[in-house]
Image: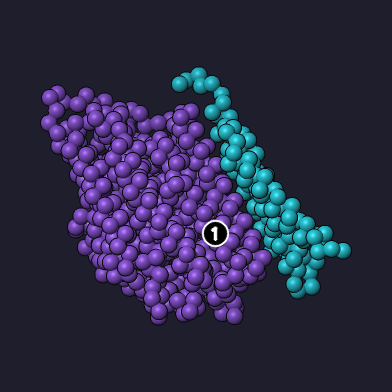
Chain colours: A purple, B cyan
Amino acid sequence: MTAALHATTPGGFLLVLAVILPVCAVLAILACGPRSAARIAMATLAAGLAVAVAITVELVWSGAALTYVVGAWRPPLGIALRADGLSGAMLVMTALVVVAVGLFARVQYGLREGGGSERERTTFWQMLLALWSALNIVFVGEDLFNLYVALELLTFAAVPLVCLDGRAETANAALRYLLFALIGSLLYLLGVGLIYGQYGTLDLLALARLSRPDPALSVALALMIVGLLAKAALFPLHLWLPPAHAGAPAQASAVLSALVIKAPIFLILRLVLDVAPGQVAFLAGQLLAVLGAASILFCSVMALRQARLKLMIAYSTVAQIGYLFIVFPLAAGGAGTSPWETIAWTGGALQLISHALAKSAMFLAAGIVIKVYGHDRIADLGGFGRALPISATAFGLAGLSLMGVPPSGGFVAKCLLLTAAVIEGYPWLAVTILLGGLLAGGYVFRIIDKALAVSASPLPSRAGVPRRLELTALALAIAAVLLGFVPLRPFGFLQIGRSGLAMAGL
Amino acid sequence: MTVALQPSVLFGLCGAALVGIGLFAVVSSPGLLRRIVGCNILGAGIFLVFGAVARRGAGAGFEADPVPQALVITGIVVAFSASALAVALLKRLAEPRSDA
């Protein structure tokens, strides 16, 4: 049975390239020294983007999932890499954000003053590439233990990014983050052990077929999901996120907030919707939705109360993540429809992607503000939109997507979720979505209001920034808005490679 | 021999006890170093559980199932790197900064 489950497809080697290209670049930077770090990184960014696009083209062209069986050792002994429509979308989104952040960092590090020390720069490039490789493994991995290693690699790359400047304050945030992540991955590992003891395989596709309601699987899934929640920073396990994401340099915060926390969420999605048997999935979905709703409301209010721009954006991240968890009960599907065919599911996937684009744009814009004014106290930023019109526009456009105002990617996502909540009979989730939108409007307009304010005296600026720096933030924000104009394309694409799995689940 | 004294059950129980001790240390102690040690005890417990799983899953005539043992080796490497990173960060926190 498992013999026919995975077979290498013609484009399968692309998945291997997506994983090892960044790793090779990290090694090359180590070998060639800091002088050529930026050049190697930029070349890898271009190559990696090309690979991600090639995977998507191959997916659309063949209409089926890409698979690569590593070393021709078939699961359950070997490890398979597999990319379906959702993985393809995540790979491209990751590549886009990483490339934009890379361009931003290159311009910023090229500036004469305040570009950071050479060690800081080299570490940034290495960690950015290592992080990209780990993210790609999470998105294409099929083996639960392989995914554990990928999650740990992701943490090991993300923690140094938090404390890139080496201040005690950020080292403290990084250590706190590492401890949360460690406990999370250890709980996940315990779950992996229990699943292996029960089923003798760790392959996700095989587990989707084998899974049956039994207490060992329920305990294992509970351990794994709680562990992943700690890494994803869902309320009430979000305490580590605001100091870590707000303390990191802007280009690092953008990657951390937009991409790193999406990896555990992606895994929770796969565990709940693919592996968990019906009754367990229902219960887990309800619980996750309650936590998600609490996350939206509590952290939106916290975001409103923050005095510093980056802390506000970090709290907004936790709030926006909540939307991804209210998908579970809405996408549970009725009789005969798989979760992957519901509008809630499409809405959730769109929210995941549009949030990544919008949040990275916001953090980059905040980074520019800090670079120019030397601080991010919201109260003292009156009229910054006059000095930095492009950054303020980027912030505003990204805010549109977070609030869910048409015509943005966030609007389509939240509209689909709202419709699903009404249809499926979850009025409290519908109210939460609407309230979350209002609160997001509150904290975004607080900044826009400051940007457009007329201050008595012009703000004392510390340094000028080249326009290219501002344009990268704007490009990401525009991408988040443009996502709203291609609403019908993701429907079909996200289901590539899913039909066989749905059949297996039934 | 009673059921409780079979090696796999004994290992499983020891593993569970270590997981409990580790989790308690991580959650309850305020000191960061204690938490790091707690994580290590938690990890050791999980590796023991893997050992029990390997012993029990010896299906096809093997002494023991080799896959969980391979997983444990990888797990130990990962746990070691994590501890090293955590201790390095702790050291950075502890030392007075001259340039700050």
Which kind of residue does numbered mark 1 sit on?
Ala
Residue pictured at 40% horizontal, 56% vertical = A290
> Is residue A462 placed above or below B60 in the rendered structure?
above
Looking at the rendering, in which quadrant would you find the N terminus of chain A? bottom right
Residue pictured at 52% horizontal, 37% vertical = A175
Q: Residue B35 in the image: x percent, y percent?
A: 60, 38
The answer to whether A160 appears left or right of A387 in the picture is right
Residue A373 location, quadrant? top left
Q: Residue B87 in the image: x percent, y percent?
A: 60, 35
Label 1 resides on the chain identified as A
Q: What residue would you read off at disc 1?
A: A222
Residue pictured at 40% horizontal, 31% vertical = A116
Q: Look at the image and tell me whether residue A129 can be seen.
A: no
> Is residue A235 placed above or below A218 in the rendered structure?
above
The answer to whether A326 appears left or right of A369 in the picture is right
Element carrying mark 1? helix
* Of the pair A9 and A443, the residue shown nearer to us: A443
The answer to whether B59 appears left or right of A105 in the picture is right
Decide: few, some or many residues near mark 1? Use Cα within 10 Å; few <14, some 14-19, many ≥20.
Answer: some
Residue pictured at 33% horizontal, 41% vertical = A302
> Is residue A210 placed above or below A398 in the rendered structure?
below
Q: Residue A275 in the image: x percent, y percent?
A: 52, 68
Number of disc labels: 1
